Amino acid sequence: MKNQYVGDVNDYLKYGLIRTLVKGRHLKAGVFWMLTDDDKRGDGEKIEY
């Protein structure tokens, strides 16, 4: 995970997918992020929602 991606609209899609995959099952979901340095790319800027 890079700080430049935090809050990107695609995060909500990922969380929704994880929630859908475990819903109604006897499973628990966990997300474990590893913080890495920003790479100065332009993606991850979709934060206007």
Image (cartoon, rainbow, N blue to C red):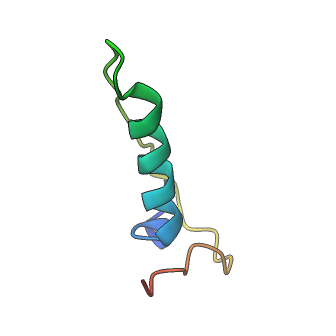
Residue extending farthest to the front is 24
Q: Nearer the viewer, residue 39 or 49?
A: 49
Residue 33 placement (x, y as % from top left): 42, 43
- The front one of 46 and 37 is 46
Tell me if residue 36 comes above or below residue 39 in the rendering.
Answer: above
Which image quarter is the C terminus in? bottom left
Determine the residue positioned at 55% across, 67% down: 38
Where residue 10 appears, as percent x and y from the top left, is 53, 63
Is residue 38 toward the left or the right of residue 47 in the image? right
- Considering every residue shown, the one lying at the far top of the view is 26
28 over 5 or under it: above or below:
above
- Indicate the position of residue 31 as horizontal and vertical percent values: 38, 36
Q: Residue at x 38, y 38 (%)?
A: 19
How far across and down, in percent of the image, does residue 3 sit? 43, 67
User: Is residue 49 depicted above or below 14 in this figure?
Assistant: below
* Lateral position of residue 39 relative to residue 24, left or right: right
Question: Total number of numbered labels?
Answer: 0
Where residue 28 sits, quadrant-wise, is top left
Above or below residue 3? Residue 34 is above
Query: Residue most toward the bottom?
Result: 48
Q: Residue at x 43, y 49 (%)?
A: 16
